Image (cartoon, grey):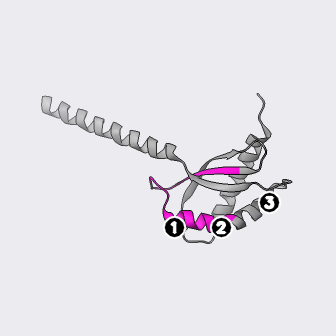
Amino acid sequence: MTFKRADRVADLIKAELSDILLRQIRDPRIGLLTITDVKMSDDLRSAKIYLVQMGKDKLDAELQAGLEKAKGFLKRELGKRLNLRYMPDVFFFYDKSFEYGSRIDRLLMEIHEKDKTNTQEDH
């Protein structure tokens, strides 16, 4: 199975960016977040970074503003660590798949509670 260079670079960016956000960012607006995926363009000129904020179904405006403000620093630090000829532009997006997953979990819990209530009424 062969991997495209863009996929390998995306994995590197995900790992390094997670480390930078954990250890070097001091902005209080950037709290607990998880990078779920990085999608690179084939020419390695842009990186779409998908993330979720812990315990939230949407990104806070403050977090988004903090990430936008830190974008230059993040790009510079990634450039130091990755040794790429050209450092891609980074864009941050909320990963909606987690919102979808939590909605499914809520619906399943409601169904389970209804079944539990119906079972108790039958006895």
Q: Secondary structure at mark 1?
A: helix
Q: Quadrant of the N terminus?
A: top right
Q: Which residues are magenta?
A: 47-71
Q: Earlier in the sequence, mark 2 or mark 3?
A: 2
> What's the residue type where badge 1 is placed?
Glu
Q: Residues within 10 Å of mark 1 (few under 14, many from 20)?
A: few
Residue 118 quadrant: top left
> What's the residue type where badge 3 is placed?
Gly
The residue carrying mark 3 is 79
Residue beneath the point at 65% across and 67% down = 70
Q: Earlier in the sequence, mark 2 or mark 1?
A: 1
Q: Residues within 10 Å of mark 2 (few under 14, many from 20)?
A: some
Residue beneath the point at 83% across and 55% down = 86
Q: Is residue 123 visible?
A: no
Q: Position of residue 15 (x, y in %)?
A: 70, 52
The residue carrying mark 2 is 70
Pick whichever, 63 or 42, lies toward us: 42
Q: Separation of disc 3 and disc 1 at Cα?
A: 26 Å
Q: Position of residue 21 (x, y in %)?
A: 64, 62
Q: Position of residue 121 (x, y in %)?
A: 13, 33
Q: Is residue 94 visible?
A: yes
Does residue 40 appear to the left or right of 105 in the view shown? Answer: right
Q: Separation of disc 2 and disc 1 at Cα?
A: 12 Å
Q: How many badges with numbers are in the image?
A: 3
Q: Separation of disc 2 and disc 3 at Cα?
A: 14 Å
> What's the residue type where badge 2 is placed?
Ala
Q: Is residue 21 above or below residue 39?
A: below
